[in-house]
Image (spheres, rainbow, N blue to C red):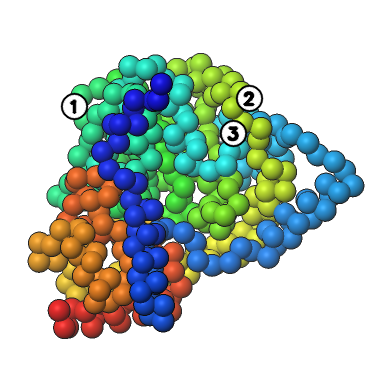
Amino acid sequence: MLNPHFQRLKSAYIFPIIEKKLAELQKDHPNQKILNLGIGDVSLPLSPRVAEAICEATREMTSSPRGYGPCGGYNFLKEAVCENEYATFGLDADEIFISDGANTDASSLLELFADDALVAVTDPTYPVYRDATLIAGKKLLTIPLSEDQGFIPRPPIERADVVYLCSPCNPTGVAMSCSDLQEWISWAKTNKAILILDNVYNGFISSKDVPTSIYQLEGARNVAIEIRSFSKWAGFTGLRCGYAVVPKTLHLAELHSLWQKRIDIKTNGISYPIQKGALACYKKEVKEELDAQVALYKTSADILLQCLSDLDQTFFGGIDAPYIFWKTPEGLDSWAFFDQLLTHSKIISIPGSGFGPHGEGFVRLSCFISPSTAQEASDALYHHFATV
């Protein structure tokens, strides 16, 4: 018997569709330069110091054999994450679980909840939250986001058992303020719900009213699980290392021990060299290097934001997240504008409809590009609107 819940998936996962379109275009026009502002993968190289830490750990294994590591991560990395990011909020290292990235954690956490749990997901949303909910056979509650509210998610009238939130958000690029998140914390307490906050873009936050962690806010340790990753701010998309924070103080106190049990059963941990590479990210000189890379991506975002502003376009994000959610001009639907940008400007974007029905009428631009590429894209857009 096959899992019947896969039949609940109504549409194909959008990123492979974009990859296929890009491959087809490059095949038909092998000499045509394509400006890929689509899939949000890093474009700057891995820090040499991080690479050396990984290589040194690998060489170490030639003389000091290391087999399976702790399923939830080596203490040296858990303690470093805690010291640098969470200790000031009253959290301990044993509340941090090292994983191969946010996607795995976001989808796997649903295993801790009952089959009839009601899971709330925003629309538009990062597709993993919705698809993982459907595959797990859970009941789905959709929270529509609107342009009028700046794509900020607001608590629903209905109750739910679990809520996925992403802030700073992929795809909208919008970050929730302290008051926005505090409203969700209060709602979760009232409804005895658990918030799963995907916070992988925390390294891009610059606005003073946007918290870098939900645990900065009162009551968060009772209702929130936070997910982070080394992927985007440290360039680990090809290395895979992230972590989930599951406080022991959650109102469902068993979640911490159940997550540990789930990890013990289903994983053998992340490799020692990769965790040593992640540890190196907290060294002062490496952190400065990684911050400089994030600053370059933010410069690219500024260039694109200025271009769209000059063209009198409607857009969201790009300040605290490396994504811009751009409203399609002249009432074009998402795929029609995607095709227009690709045909006329050789720019790859992501149709907003791929993130849910309420993303229709928008495209997502990724700012994981160099400033020179951002300027090329801007020049192409200036020309596009002057000629189309």
Q: Earlier in the sequence, mark 2 or mark 3?
A: 3
Inter-mark Cα distance, 1 to 3: 33 Å
The number of numbered badges drawn on the structure is 3
Mark 2 — residue?
A: 264
Q: Residue at x 72, y 40 (%)?
A: 76
Which tag, 2 or 1, sits closer to the chain's start? 1
Residue on which disc 3 sits: 97
Residue at the outermost left position: 330
**What amino acid type is highlighted by mark number 3?**
Phe
Residue drawn where x is 29% and y is 80% of the image:
380
Categorize mark 2 by other alpha carbons within 10 Å: few (<14), some (14-19), many (20+).
Answer: some
For the point 27% across and 28% down, the residue is 140
Q: Is mark 1 on a helix, strand or loop?
A: loop
Splitting the image into 4 quarters, where does residue 298 fall? bottom left
User: What residue appears at the point 39 percent right and 16 percent down from the top-left corner?
Assistant: 114
Residue 206 spot, x, y in % from top left = 42, 58
- The 10 Å Cα crowd at callout 1, few under 14, some 14 to 19, many 20 or more, is few
Give the Cα separation between the discs numbered 2 and 1. Answer: 37 Å
**Secondary structure at numbered mark 2:** helix
Q: Quadrant of the N terminus?
A: top left
Q: Which kind of residue does numbered mark 2 sit on? A: Asp
Q: Is residue 185 among what the camera can see?
A: no
